[in-house]
Amino acid sequence: MEAGPAHIYSRLPLSAEQDSEIRHYIHGRQRNGLPWDTAELRAMVADMLEPPEIVDEDRQALSGSMDKERAAALLDGERERDEAHLGSTC
């Protein structure tokens, strides 16, 4: 029996999203005629199984950055809505 991605990665304790990400990577590599069993894939799986620890400072910085991105997205949405409203009244 040939060792394929379905046999190698099917029994790992991964979430559905992680499994989907791995399958997408493998499918893309196979579709392009590239080897799928790469160091990059092994590193991806290793990170999924044992994610690096996030230091509290990094977590706070990430949270602050996400808050700023949400605020910017809200402002952009309001600006687009206002522009659409102004355009429909002219």
Image: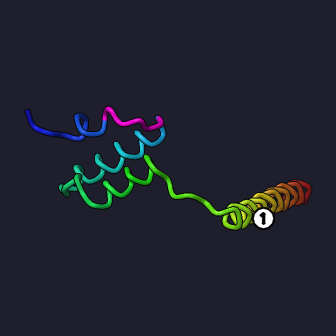
**Magenta residues, start to end:** 10-15
Q: How is the image coloured?
A: rainbow
Q: How crowded is mark 1: few (under 14 residues within 10 Å), some or many (20 or more)?
A: few
Q: Is residue 2 above or below residue 72?
A: above
Within the magenta stretch, is there residue 84?
A: no
The x and y percentages for residue 48 are: 44, 49
Q: In this view, does 31 lie to the left or right of 57?
A: left
Disc 1 element: helix
The x and y percentages for residue 57 are: 71, 67
Point 81% across, 60% down: residue = 71
Point 29% across, 46% down: residue = 27
- Pointer 1 residue: 68
Amino acid beneath label 1 = Lys
Within the magenta stretch, is there residue 12?
A: yes
Q: In this view, does 41 lie above or below 65?
A: above
Q: Main secondary structure of the magenta part?
A: loop
Q: In this view, does 61 lie to the left or right of 17?
A: right
Point 46% across, 35% down: residue = 16
Point 51% across, 58% down: residue = 52
Foreground residue among 3 and 70: 3
Classify residue 81 by image quadrant.
bottom right
Classify residue 10 by image quadrant.
top left
The x and y percentages for residue 69 are: 74, 62
